Image (tube, rainbow, N blue to C red):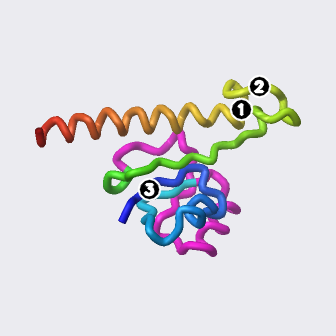
Amino acid sequence: MRTFYEFFAGGGMARAGLGRNWECLFANDFSQKKVDSYMANWGNEDILCDDVSNITIEQLEGQADLAWASFPCQDLSLAGSGAGLSGKRSGTFWAFWKLITSLKKENSKRTANYT
């Protein structure tokens, strides 16, 4: 079975789309309202209510095949402020990117020990 992390999870629609052949190892959203929706859909064992900038690689269980991020797009849309990835909402992408980059480096170190 393939595994994944789901960031900016909302109600877990990425999880729904991936289907039953995928196992969620970790999910997060900063909004308690969204976390409540996720828990209603999927249970509460996988989800953490916190800002992605506060999450550390130590909190991520296992080694996922996929890291999914449905980060806020308001600053990217034509109807938004036009701030792009520098915007307050869409800029949260960078905290996710930093975490995943750190995770990639950590996994490279682990893999190097086995070769």
Badges 3 and 2: C-beta atoms under 8 Å apart? no
Residue in the foreground of this view, choosing between 115 and 59: 115
Q: Residue at x 88, y 36 (%)?
A: 79
Disc 1: which residue: 88
Q: Residue at x 67, y 55 (%)?
A: 31
Asked whether residue 47 is drawn in magenta, I would say yes
Q: Is residue 97 left or right of residue 82?
A: left
**Span shown in magenta:** 29-58
Nearer to us: label 1 or label 3: 3
Callout 1 secondary element: loop
Which mark is first along the chain, 2 or 1? 2
The quadrant of the image that shows the N terminus is bottom left
Amino acid carrying mark 2 in the image: Ala
Residue count near mark 2 (Cα–Cα under 10 Å), binned few <14, some 14–19, many ≥20? some
Asked whether residue 87 is drawn in magenta, I would say no
Disc 2: which residue: 83
Query: Percent position (x, y) of residue 64?
Result: 37, 52
Callout 3 secondary element: strand
Which mark is first along the chain, 2 or 3? 3
